[in-house]
Image (spheres, rainbow, N blue to C red):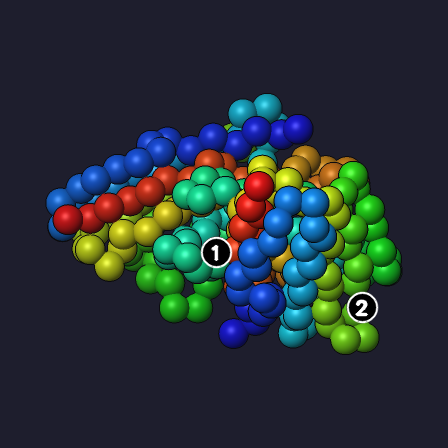
Amino acid sequence: GAVVSQHPSRVICKSGTSVKIECRSLDFQATTMFWYRQFPKQSLMLMATSNEGSKATYEQGVEKDKFLINHASLTLSTLTVTSAHPEDSSFYICSARAPTGQGRETQYFGPGTRLLVL
Amino acid sequence: SQQGEEDPQALSIQEGENATMNCSYKTSINNLQWYRQNSGRGLVHLILIRSNEREKHSGRLRVTLDTSKKSSSLLITASRAADTASYFCATDLLSQKLVFGTGTRLLVSP
Protein backbone atom coordinates (compact mmCIF):
# COMPACT_ATOMS: atom_id res chain seq x y z
CA GLY A 1 0.00 0.00 0.00
CA ALA A 2 0.86 3.67 -0.15
CA VAL A 3 3.49 4.92 2.28
CA VAL A 4 3.61 8.24 4.07
CA SER A 5 6.64 9.28 6.08
CA GLN A 6 7.16 12.03 8.63
CA HIS A 7 10.30 13.68 9.83
CA PRO A 8 11.38 14.09 12.51
CA SER A 9 9.73 11.36 14.55
CA ARG A 10 10.47 13.16 17.78
CA VAL A 11 11.59 16.68 18.60
CA ILE A 12 12.30 18.53 21.80
CA CYS A 13 12.66 22.28 21.64
CA LYS A 14 12.77 25.33 23.85
CA SER A 15 9.80 27.58 24.25
CA GLY A 16 9.77 30.33 21.64
CA THR A 17 11.51 28.40 18.90
CA SER A 18 9.94 27.23 15.64
CA VAL A 19 9.74 23.61 14.60
CA LYS A 20 9.22 22.26 11.10
CA ILE A 21 7.66 18.85 10.49
CA GLU A 22 7.77 17.23 7.08
CA CYS A 23 5.22 14.86 5.61
CA ARG A 24 6.08 12.96 2.45
CA SER A 25 4.12 10.58 0.27
CA LEU A 26 6.81 8.15 -0.83
CA ASP A 27 5.27 6.25 -3.69
CA PHE A 28 2.36 8.34 -4.86
CA GLN A 29 1.46 11.93 -5.56
CA ALA A 30 -0.86 13.60 -3.11
CA THR A 31 -2.65 16.79 -4.09
CA THR A 32 -4.26 16.87 -0.67
CA MET A 33 -2.69 16.15 2.69
CA PHE A 34 -4.11 16.58 6.15
CA TRP A 35 -2.56 17.56 9.46
CA TYR A 36 -3.91 16.26 12.75
CA ARG A 37 -3.00 16.81 16.36
CA GLN A 38 -3.48 14.23 19.07
CA PHE A 39 -3.13 14.89 22.78
CA PRO A 40 -2.38 11.98 25.14
CA LYS A 41 -5.19 9.45 25.35
CA GLN A 42 -7.36 11.55 23.09
CA SER A 43 -8.54 11.29 19.53
CA LEU A 44 -7.11 12.92 16.43
CA MET A 45 -8.30 16.42 15.72
CA LEU A 46 -8.02 17.76 12.20
CA MET A 47 -6.00 20.97 12.12
CA ALA A 48 -5.89 21.80 8.44
CA THR A 49 -6.14 20.56 4.92
CA SER A 50 -3.03 21.11 2.84
CA ASN A 51 -3.57 21.66 -0.87
CA GLU A 52 -0.71 21.48 -3.33
CA GLY A 53 -0.04 24.85 -4.87
CA SER A 54 -2.60 26.77 -2.85
CA LYS A 55 -3.28 27.95 0.67
CA ALA A 56 -4.15 25.50 3.38
CA THR A 57 -7.65 25.37 4.80
CA TYR A 58 -7.66 25.58 8.58
CA GLU A 59 -10.24 24.18 10.94
CA GLN A 60 -12.06 26.46 13.29
CA GLY A 61 -9.94 27.43 16.26
CA VAL A 62 -6.60 26.63 14.63
CA GLU A 63 -4.36 29.67 14.29
CA LYS A 64 -3.01 29.81 10.76
CA ASP A 65 -0.21 32.19 11.72
CA LYS A 66 0.99 29.80 14.39
CA PHE A 67 0.74 26.62 12.36
CA LEU A 68 2.18 27.40 8.95
CA ILE A 69 1.51 24.85 6.26
CA ASN A 70 3.29 24.67 2.94
CA HIS A 71 2.48 22.11 0.26
CA ALA A 72 5.12 22.96 -2.29
CA SER A 73 5.10 19.73 -4.24
CA LEU A 74 2.87 16.73 -4.86
CA THR A 75 4.88 14.65 -2.40
CA LEU A 76 5.72 17.06 0.40
CA SER A 77 3.77 19.10 2.91
CA THR A 78 5.37 20.86 5.86
CA LEU A 79 3.90 22.06 9.13
CA THR A 80 5.82 24.72 11.01
CA VAL A 81 4.88 25.38 14.60
CA THR A 82 6.01 28.95 15.13
CA SER A 83 7.04 30.31 18.51
CA ALA A 84 6.22 27.02 20.15
CA HIS A 85 4.96 26.94 23.71
CA PRO A 86 4.57 24.04 26.15
CA GLU A 87 0.85 23.78 25.34
CA ASP A 88 1.81 22.97 21.74
CA SER A 89 3.40 19.74 22.94
CA SER A 90 1.47 17.01 21.20
CA PHE A 91 1.58 14.21 18.65
CA TYR A 92 1.27 15.60 15.13
CA ILE A 93 0.16 13.23 12.40
CA CYS A 94 -0.19 13.84 8.69
CA SER A 95 -2.12 11.88 6.13
CA ALA A 96 -2.52 11.82 2.40
CA ARG A 97 -5.38 10.66 0.26
CA ALA A 98 -4.71 7.80 -2.06
CA PRO A 99 -4.34 8.59 -5.76
CA THR A 100 -7.40 8.78 -7.97
CA GLY A 101 -9.44 5.68 -8.33
CA GLN A 102 -11.53 3.56 -6.05
CA GLY A 103 -8.90 3.61 -3.35
CA ARG A 104 -9.09 7.37 -3.17
CA GLU A 105 -11.40 7.15 -0.19
CA THR A 106 -8.57 5.82 1.93
CA GLN A 107 -6.19 8.10 3.76
CA TYR A 108 -2.68 6.88 4.51
CA PHE A 109 -1.20 8.14 7.73
CA GLY A 110 2.34 8.99 8.61
CA PRO A 111 3.92 7.54 11.76
CA GLY A 112 3.55 10.83 13.61
CA THR A 113 5.88 13.38 15.18
CA ARG A 114 6.01 13.80 18.91
CA LEU A 115 6.74 17.41 19.86
CA LEU A 116 7.81 18.36 23.35
CA VAL A 117 8.24 22.04 24.09
CA LEU A 118 10.14 22.81 27.26
CA SER B 1 -18.34 19.55 17.42
CA GLN B 2 -18.74 17.03 14.65
CA GLN B 3 -16.65 14.46 16.45
CA GLY B 4 -18.18 11.05 16.77
CA GLU B 5 -18.37 9.13 19.98
CA GLU B 6 -17.26 5.62 20.65
CA ASP B 7 -18.13 3.25 23.38
CA PRO B 8 -16.87 1.73 25.41
CA GLN B 9 -13.96 4.07 26.11
CA ALA B 10 -11.99 1.08 27.32
CA LEU B 11 -12.47 -2.65 26.95
CA SER B 12 -10.55 -5.44 28.65
CA ILE B 13 -11.02 -9.04 27.52
CA GLN B 14 -9.24 -12.39 27.43
CA GLU B 15 -7.63 -13.90 24.37
CA GLY B 16 -10.13 -15.82 22.31
CA GLU B 17 -13.06 -13.62 23.27
CA ASN B 18 -14.80 -11.28 20.86
CA ALA B 19 -14.51 -7.51 21.16
CA THR B 20 -17.25 -5.15 20.04
CA MET B 21 -16.83 -1.41 19.72
CA ASN B 22 -19.55 1.04 18.78
CA CYS B 23 -19.37 4.37 17.04
CA SER B 24 -22.00 7.06 16.67
CA TYR B 25 -21.72 10.08 14.43
CA LYS B 26 -23.67 13.24 13.70
CA THR B 27 -23.69 14.15 10.02
CA SER B 28 -24.21 12.61 6.59
CA ILE B 29 -21.23 10.63 5.40
CA ASN B 30 -19.64 9.21 2.28
CA ASN B 31 -18.21 6.31 4.18
CA LEU B 32 -17.04 5.26 7.62
CA GLN B 33 -13.61 3.87 8.33
CA TRP B 34 -12.02 2.08 11.23
CA TYR B 35 -8.41 2.59 12.21
CA ARG B 36 -6.10 1.02 14.73
CA GLN B 37 -3.37 2.83 16.65
CA ASN B 38 -0.74 1.22 18.78
CA SER B 39 0.45 3.36 21.66
CA GLY B 40 2.34 6.41 20.43
CA ARG B 41 2.33 5.25 16.84
CA GLY B 42 0.62 6.16 13.60
CA LEU B 43 -2.70 4.87 12.40
CA VAL B 44 -3.35 1.72 10.43
CA HIS B 45 -6.39 1.57 8.19
CA LEU B 46 -8.49 -1.49 8.95
CA ILE B 47 -11.67 -1.36 6.95
CA LEU B 48 -13.94 1.02 5.05
CA ILE B 49 -17.69 0.71 4.70
CA ARG B 50 -19.60 2.90 2.31
CA SER B 51 -22.83 4.67 3.17
CA ASN B 52 -24.84 2.29 0.97
CA GLU B 53 -23.39 -0.81 2.62
CA ARG B 54 -24.69 -2.42 5.79
CA GLU B 55 -22.03 -4.98 6.66
CA LYS B 56 -18.49 -5.78 5.67
CA HIS B 57 -15.98 -8.43 6.64
CA SER B 58 -12.22 -8.56 6.54
CA GLY B 59 -10.53 -11.52 8.18
CA ARG B 60 -11.48 -11.45 11.87
CA LEU B 61 -13.08 -8.04 11.51
CA ARG B 62 -16.77 -7.42 10.95
CA VAL B 63 -18.15 -3.93 10.54
CA THR B 64 -21.78 -2.89 10.43
CA LEU B 65 -23.26 0.46 9.47
CA ASP B 66 -26.73 1.80 10.23
CA THR B 67 -27.10 5.16 8.56
CA SER B 68 -30.61 5.64 9.95
CA LYS B 69 -29.18 5.51 13.46
CA LYS B 70 -25.88 7.09 12.44
CA SER B 71 -23.97 4.29 14.08
CA SER B 72 -21.42 1.62 13.30
CA SER B 73 -19.88 -1.28 15.12
CA LEU B 74 -16.58 -3.10 14.83
CA LEU B 75 -16.39 -6.70 15.93
CA ILE B 76 -13.05 -8.43 16.36
CA THR B 77 -13.53 -12.17 16.68
CA ALA B 78 -11.20 -14.59 18.46
CA SER B 79 -9.09 -11.75 19.80
CA ARG B 80 -5.35 -12.04 20.34
CA ALA B 81 -2.97 -10.22 22.64
CA ALA B 82 -1.57 -8.51 19.54
CA ASP B 83 -4.96 -6.86 18.99
CA THR B 84 -4.28 -4.65 22.02
CA ALA B 85 -4.46 -1.08 20.70
CA SER B 86 -6.75 1.90 20.41
CA TYR B 87 -9.43 1.72 17.75
CA PHE B 88 -10.97 4.75 16.12
CA CYS B 89 -13.87 5.16 13.79
CA ALA B 90 -13.63 7.99 11.30
CA THR B 91 -16.39 9.40 9.19
CA ASP B 92 -15.58 10.61 5.71
CA LEU B 93 -17.79 13.64 5.36
CA LEU B 94 -19.29 14.96 2.17
CA SER B 95 -16.55 17.59 2.36
CA GLN B 96 -14.02 14.71 2.14
CA LYS B 97 -12.63 15.42 5.58
CA LEU B 98 -12.16 12.62 8.07
CA VAL B 99 -13.62 13.19 11.52
CA PHE B 100 -12.42 10.78 14.16
CA GLY B 101 -14.36 9.31 17.01
CA THR B 102 -13.19 9.41 20.59
CA GLY B 103 -11.65 5.95 20.41
CA THR B 104 -11.81 2.68 22.31
CA ARG B 105 -8.75 1.36 24.14
CA LEU B 106 -8.75 -2.42 23.84
CA LEU B 107 -6.67 -4.61 26.11
CA VAL B 108 -6.49 -8.31 25.31
CA SER B 109 -4.89 -10.38 28.03
CA PRO B 110 -3.19 -13.70 27.29
Residue at the top extreme of this rendering: A27
Q: Is residue A48 visible?
A: no
Q: Residue A58, percent across and down?
A: 44, 59
Q: Which mark is residue A118?
A: none
Q: How packed is label 2: few (under 14 Cα within 10 Å), some, or many (20 or more)?
A: some
> What's the chain of the residue with tag 2?
B
Residues B89 and B29: in front is: B89
Q: Can residue A98 be seen in this view?
A: yes
Name the side, left or right, on which B27 lies relative to A96. Answer: right
Q: How packed is label 1: few (under 14 Cα within 10 Å), some, or many (20 or more)?
A: many
Count of numbered marks: 2
Residue in view at x 76 percent, y 42 percent: B60
Q: Tag 2's secondary structure?
A: strand
Residue in view at x 37 percent, y 48 percent: A91
Residues A77 and B15: in front is: B15
Residues A37 and B62: in front is: B62
Residue in view at x 58 percent, y 37 percent: B82
Q: Residue B42, percent across and down?
A: 49, 40
Q: Residue A92, percent across and down?
A: 39, 47
Name the side, left or right, on which B65 lies relative to A43. Answer: right
* Picture quadrant of residue A19: top left
Q: In which quarter of the image is the C terminus of chain B?
A: top right
Q: Which mark is residue B66?
A: 2
Please name the amino acid that badge 1 sits on: Leu
Q: Tag 1's secondary structure?
A: strand
B67 in relation to A1, above or below: below
3D distance between C-alphas at marks 1 and 2 = 23 Å
Find disc 1 in the rendering and name its residue. Answer: A44
Please name the amino acid that badge 2 sits on: Asp
Name the side, left or right, on which A88 lies relative to A111. Answer: left
